[in-house]
Image (cartoon, rainbow, N blue to C red):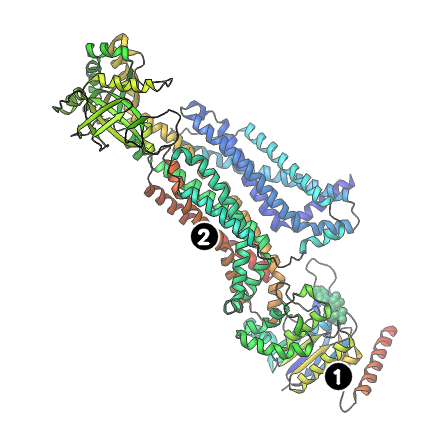
Amino acid sequence: MAFLEIEHIEKVYTPRLGGAKVRALADVSFTLEQGEFLAIMGESGAGKTTLLNILAALDKPTGGSVRLCGREMTAIPEGELASFRRDRLGFVFQDFNLLDTFTLEDNIYLPLVLQGRKINDMRRMLRPIAQRLGIAEILKKYPYEVSGGQKQRAAVARALITGPQLILADEPTGALDSKASDALLRLLGEVNEAGQTIVMVTHSVKAASHASRVLFLRDGRVYHQLYRGSLTGEQMFARISDTLTALAGGERDA
Amino acid sequence: MRKAALYARLAVRGMRSSGEIVGPFALAMACCAAMCYILRFLAYNELIPAMQGSIYVQMCLSLGAGILALITVWIGLYANAFVLRRRTKELGLYHILGLRKRDIACVMAVESALLCAVCTAAGVALGVLLSKAALLGLLRLLAWNIPMGFDFSAPAARETAIAFAALFAFLLVRNLFVVSRLSPVELLRSADKGEREPRTRHIAAVLGVLALGAGYYIALTAENPLMAITGFFIAAGLVIIGTQLLFGAGGVALFKALRRSERFYYQPKHFAAVSGMIYRMNQNARGLANICILLTSALVCVSGTVALYAGIDQSIREMFPHAITINRYIAPDELDAFLETGVGGAAERAARDALAGHADDVQTQWFLSYSLAARQAEDGSLSLMSPSTTDLNGMYEIMVMTQADYNRLHGGSVSLMPGEALIEGFDAEELRIGSLTYRRAGGIPSATTSNGTAIDTLRVSKIEMIVPDVRDLLALRGEVEATGRKVVTDIRFALNLDPAGTTGGEIVAMEGELLEAARGAMGERFSGGLKITTAASFRQYMIELDGSFVFLGIFLALLFSVATVLLIYYKQISEGYDDRERFVIMQKVGMSAAEVRQSIRSQVLLIFFMPLVMAGIHLLAASKIIVTLLKLLSTADFALFAGCAALTLALFGALYVAVCMATARRYYRIVLR
Ligand SMILES: Nc1ncnc2c1ncn2[C@@H]1O[C@H](COP(=O)(O)OP(=O)(O)OP(=O)(O)O)[C@@H](O)[C@H]1O
Ligand SMILES: [Mg+2]
């Protein structure tokens, strides 16, 4: 049984005050196995964030079904979903979603606090990950006092600190320089090797080339999938670039 | 013309879309307008001036009008600023979309006009509905007969409309001023201006504690009713300042301390609440301090005035031991004639005869007495008081009568030597007043027949004396005269009558007849200056006075409650909007809806328990000075006031919690939608 089974999901946004409906996802199907590292690519507005939100059960699809370990997502009660997000899911949001009233440290503790952990445990868990992400020195600062890249790394730390089964990362390298991106991608690779499943949305070919599979979204559909198989990093990079070129070309034809 | 339609459309759309905050503002203003109408309605009501004692009602009505105006303007300013803050973004959008500032000003003017019209109309309508109830309530309190019928007061409505038009015009000018100084970018941003974490303000905290301590000290040490009036206002001012300072500084310090306590802070239900509150304490503090002050004011108004009203009968019993007293002051040159003609006894017989037809039985007594106030000096002697003194320390009221009157009234056989006196209430061997000295020959076997006097209520110590002769009364009067004061009290002739089986109303009705009877018996020489007082008519006087106060107290408490509810509501809404994003994020990270609810409940409790507890403490601290003040008007004791205060506190506390819980729903809805 696959970890996540997505079958023909559709998402139509209906604006509250009338206006045109937006079909963010038309028909998306794929399955995700435990321990996979999936990258999702696609143009801005292709529906990537929408898809992640549905995977995290933050949003409901307007059609199709999502099964988590064989269970229909819509059938899971709200309280259980909350504990799923709390205990088994780490989400790096595109806009970080850090709380301005907390220091970075307290922001990172948030899921641990919700789990009811002791402060000493939390400290012990934070130290290595903050070191790896290079934010150990700024933990006492507030989000409005640090740069975008630093915020992004804090958001990553918050998603990873609970050691979740599933990590959803929405452009986690978007605000990072190449050195920090490399460090983060290495970290994600290690985490994945340790058995955690990762779904990462990215615009960066380089970031996507770290994944074991790349899924291309276009017009709310899965346009193409690339499996890494036994390809090297460079070969993967070239294949992704080609696919993206084809994707852009296809649009011109349409 | 097309433009006018556009303005109107934008104004209506704007107000509809922010109905959540404009609505309560309009409702509060409508309530104020209703109260304004009712006050003016009562002031114009022709029933009130027709009744005696209307002067107190009028006094209370104008006092109420003053405070109403003050609070209404304050509510207006506060709520208006709140609405404006929430709406600047929308106005900024209009600006970006191409409306000039002039157009925006026009939109705002149309909005103000609409809002003003709606509030005034609704307020007057509500006022008309409630005014009859208010009139009936007032008349009942004053124990007047209640006429039926219904009326509408056009001048009251007109004045209300004018006052509110002026208020809204003033608010509009302020808003225009505020908006004109903002740049478009600021207009867009000001709704979500992030505040930094506030620092703990130690100086403010210390000043707050000092102000509060000083206020409490004044309130708790107030002994002298005459000084208590100024003391009360000084203490109230200090407590208001102290409360304002303490809520900000104390709140930040409290929540920071909570955050430092890691065991408490890192718990799901406290984590979000505490951090959010530190952050917003500065903006919260003013609102919370205001809630606390309004609540305290309402509590003081209601408990004080109700205690006054409830204590009327007790006061009357103490101040008027006799149902009817006919009295006259006898000048020194009249004294011989008074005694020789025996007019005292004649008046007693005449009054008894006049009453005989109306009462089952009549107790009567008449006597001469002399009263003076003196202060104990260091050597133990009593020095006569200057009339303007307000210091009641060591003060005595001395009531003197002759042994002849005493023996006649009590069937005693007291026989004193010159220079001797029976003295009660002063234990020294000798009593010296000015240049006179009396040797204490013993106490007074049976109680004299003191008439309660106004000074009674001030609880000064009392001395009663029986002296050998009426010449001693004259001598004492001479001592008072020797102090050089302009007005010297004369010897008082008093005739006390206690009919059995007559009602207060009957007694009041007989006042004239009795006075005529006494006049007739006392002859032409003594009938001038003869006065009659009855406990029953004084009771009506007190009911009118205290009833007016109760009405005012309840009226003000209602007004303060309107303001408090509005403050609480806005607090919840702004909390909700400020917290919304935080709770949305928390839910994304795994907080369940139940945990959100719990967290909000914990936050609402933490925030709103503070003003209530503080108001309770303020009331406790104020109780002493309030009781002291009440003694100016009644013989109220602490137990009576404590009972009224406890009842009021329980009532308001319950209402307060209910309002907080009801408005907390708004909060959930904002956060969870
Ligand atoms: N809450 C919403 N209400 C209405 N429409 C929405 C909403 N969220 C997204 N959309 C629309 O759905 C489409 C997909 O949005 P989505 O955020 O998933 O794109 P994306 O692939 O994440 O883009 P980007 O790379 O820019 O982040 C867009 O056209 C967007 O306008
Ligand atoms: Mg996106």
Q: Is the Cβ of the residue at disc 2 closer than 8 Å to that at disc 1?
A: no
The correct choice, above or below, for B545 with respect to A241 in the image is: above
Q: Amino acid at mark 2?
A: Val
Q: Measuring from the top left, give residue B660's x and y in whole percent.
A: 50, 53
Q: Amino acid at mark 1?
A: His
Which quarter of the picture shows residue B141? top left
The correct choice, above or below, for A198 with respect to B229 in the image is: below
Query: Mark 2: which secondary structure?
Result: helix
Mark 1, residue position: A210
Residue B526 appearing in the image: no
Please, which residue is most extreme toward the top here?
A: B524
Which quarter of the picture shows residue A76? bottom right
Which is in the foreground here, disc 2 or disc 1? 2
Marks 2 & 1 on one chain? no
Left or right, residue B104 beside residue B126: right
Q: Is mark 1 within 8 Å of ligand 1?
A: no
Query: Mark 1: which secondary structure?
Result: loop
Q: Residues within 10 Å of mark 1 (few under 14, many from 20)?
A: many
Left or right, residue B597 beside residue A21: left
The C terminus of chain A lies in quadrant: bottom right
Q: Quadrant of ligand 2?
A: bottom right
Residue B641 appearing in the image: yes
Q: Measuring from the top left, give residue B626's x and y in whole percent.
A: 40, 40
The N terminus of chain A lies in quadrant: bottom right
Q: Measuring from the top left, give residue B262's x and y in whole percent.
A: 52, 69
Mark 2, residue position: B613
Q: Measuring from the top left, give residue B55's x and y in whole percent.
A: 44, 25
Tell which subunit mark 2 falls on.
Answer: B
